[in-house]
Amino acid sequence: MADRYLSFTGTGPGRFLTRRLGLPQPAPLKRWSAERPAQAGDRLLLTAGKSDLELAAAEPGLGLTASSERPDAVLLDATGVRDIETLAEVHAALHPVVRSVAASGRIVVLGAPLDPADHHQAAVQQALEGFTRSLGKEIGRGRTVNLVRLTDARAAESTLRFLLSPKSAYVSGQVIEVGAREAGDTREAEALTDPDRPLANHTALVTGAARGIGEAVAETLARDGARVVVLDVPQAEQDARRVADRLGGTALTLDITAPDAGERIAAALPDGLDVLVHNAGITRDRRLVNMPAERWSSVLDVNLASVLRTTDALLASGAMRRGGRIVATASIAGLAGNAGQTNYGASKAGIVGLVRSLAPRALAEHGVTVNAVAPGFIETKMTAAVPLLIREAGRRMNSLAQGGLPVDVAETTAWLADPGSGAVNGQVVRVCGQSLLGA
Ligand code: NAI
């Protein structure tokens, strides 16, 4: 659905009027396109404290520069911030350049894991979170600010590429932890493949992919080279086939709540599966006092129980190949709660619990990472059906003052699905423009 307010504020009179009235000023976001695959301008590298990362040398591919008049992106290495004095270097580094960062530009702060043996280091490293989230809220003009906690620059390459690129247009105010390079990182093996098609020779199955966010996910994974399997309910067979045909993939019509759904997926994919995206989801809103048991159980069954069952079945049978990626779909409603959505909020919070618990074991035992995306207000048929005033509030109550698009969730999923993202595990990444809900 078109965001008329965003179009209006893009005109001269619209900008003038909305500024005078103190109304939100959404900036049109610059997203990825084949014509504009990367930010065009400089990527400025700054440092606060004494860092051991040697980022420019470790990651020449990121194209970092030591000075720029008008950077498109700023990477601030604050991993060496250990005390109040070095924390002040964060201010000293960014204060002079923040104004010059281009519209739709990126600021990525790099932090270190909190040191349990040093409460001064822990305090100032945690301070980076408050700093990042606050800067994200004030920076405006479609610019985003995120924090990555890391120990190894190379393990974080796919994450930095994503966050510094137009693909992360609607991801802001996030804290992402990247571990050391582990068994799940198949990048070395993939080094010979085309960097524009990281998922070449990989099979990806997306549930609920006949339309909406799932369709965009399937499309983006196909762009990245994956053979996609478009799974949806039998009633959506025509749409599923249309999407699959367009993407050169295959359709699989199956109700994901079937008790043997995992076994049927495994049977349909005798060569195994590399990427599993749990996207299918439903809402059946009602306040708890008015909610019949059926509304509770149908939402819990589609959004959580089927995710648990199929994940277990595909891991246990070995259908998920080593180096595989599981990406589940939570929601900010699962983080913040939402009136009328006790069933939905419970199901989506359940996804967060599943990811946190399973991720380390799935990586250790199967070489598979498990992460989730948590979309905020995304422009889909689901949100178009929301009453006008609530819809407007949902759209504007985030730092970018607009709704996201299905492709924003898809790009985030594609980063998590990347063979180079093996050190990103157990993360729940919000794709919400830094929504105020649950922040
Ligand atoms: P949608 O309703 O447009 O698409 C969902 C798809 O899942 C449909 O094609 C549907 O047929 C399929 N599906 C439903 N039950 C199924 C089942 N039992 N087996 C197989 N397929 C099934 O929804 P949308 O907006 O694209 O959402 C996708 C995911 O993102 C859902 O998990 C949703 O909860 C989540 N989400 C969406 C947000 C939004 O703003 N649209 C915000 C937060 C989360």
Image (tube, grey):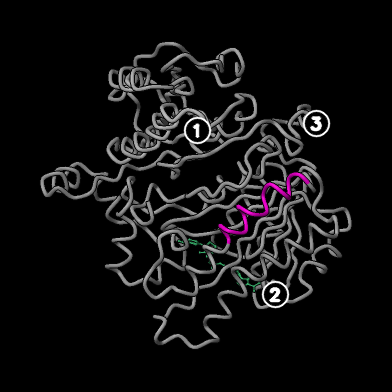
Q: CA distance from mark 2 to mark 1?
A: 43 Å
Q: Is residue 128 left or right of residue 292?
A: left
Crowd rating for badge 2 (residues with CA inside 10 Å; few <14, some 14–19, many 20+)? some
Q: Is residue 352 left or right of residue 252?
A: left
Q: Is residue 337 left or right of residue 322?
A: left
Amino acid type indicated by mark 2: Asp
Residue hosting label 2: 255
The label nearer to you, 2 versus 1, is 1
Rendered view: 439 above or below 109: below
Rendered view: 377 above or below 200: below
Disc on res. 189: 3
Label 2 CB less than 8 angstroms from ligand 1: yes
Rendered view: 98 above or below 149: above
Label 1 CB less than 8 angstroms from ligand 1: no
Amino acid type indicated by mark 3: Ala
Q: Which residue is at a point 34% across and 45% down the rendered structure image?
A: 400
Under circle 2, the secondary element is loop
Crowd rating for badge 3 (residues with CA inside 10 Å; few <14, some 14–19, many 20+)? few
Under circle 1, the secondary element is loop
Percent across and percent down for residue 68 are 39, 14
Q: Earlier in the sequence, mark 2 or mark 1?
A: 1
**Is the magenta region chiefly helix, strand or loop?**
helix
Residue hosting label 1: 114
Q: Which residue is at a point 68% across and 34% down the rendered structure image?
A: 420
Q: Which residue is at a point 75% across and 62% down the rendered structure image?
A: 312
Percent across and percent down for residue 330 are 53, 59
Q: Is residue 389 left or right of residue 292?
A: left
Residue sitting nearer the eye, 439 or 329: 439
Do the CB atoms of the residues marked 2 and 3 lie less than 8 Å apart?
Answer: no
Range of magenta residues: 351-364
